Image (tube, rainbow, N blue to C red):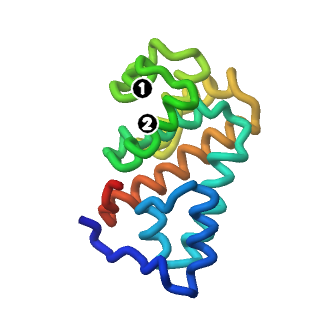
Amino acid sequence: MARVEYADIHDPKIRPLVERIQRERSSLPNLYRMLLNSPAVAQGWLTYLTAIRQQSSLPPSLREMLILRVAVLNQADYEFEQHLPIALKEGCTQAQVESIRQGDFAALSDADGAAMRYCDEMTREIRVRDDTFAALRAVFSDQEIVEVTATIAAYNMVSRFLEAIQVDHE
């Protein structure tokens, strides 16, 4: 049970933002129902996460693998459950999902494995070792490195918010 009440989505002051979220997300997930308690935060969150999810140059399958890995590392079941169907739709295989769950990246491509190791260090240690970054640098452009880093950072933010407030699963 969530630790904070969900916002009243019928409040006329937030109705335009509710409608925008519904348009951009095709639904109104509990995460956004919670964020709407602070319309400014909800609006900024939506803009940032839309950029990460819909405007990045990363392959959608890699983006979703990064999101799933952050969810695993942070024990964020809501985040994992929300993104697993998206990951599968974007071309992730069950074998890749299991690799991500187990933290065994041997079955992944060199690029995907480098991104997962980078994700692990960024999430667990904050600072990334030079050799881990060098492996990432070897397979990604500057733009892609920024987008990988921003995706990991964004979904660490998401999982920490979800878990601290204990947002209910749909």
Identify the secondary structure beneath mark 2: helix
Give above or below for 111 relative to 90.
above
Please rate how many residues cluster around mark 2, counting C-alpha atoms within 10 Å: few if below 14, some from 14 to 19, many from 20. Answer: some
Packing grade of label 1 (10 A; few <14, some 14-19, many >=20) is some
Mark 2 touches mark 1? (CB < 8 Å): yes
Q: Which residue is mark 1?
A: 97
Q: Position of residue 145 (x, y in %)?
A: 68, 36
Q: Tell me the tag on residue 73.
A: none
The N terminus - image quarter: bottom left
Task: Name which residue lies at 53% across and 36% down.
Answer: 64
> Along the line of sight, which residue is nearer the eye, 60 or 103?
60
Q: How many marks?
A: 2
Residue type pointed to by label 1: Val
Is 68 situated left or right of 109 in this image?
Answer: left
Front disc: 2 or 1: 2
Q: What residue would you read off at disc 2?
A: 84
Residue 12 picture quarter: bottom right
Tell me residue 156's x, y (percent): 47, 50
Residue at image point 49% right, 29% down: 88
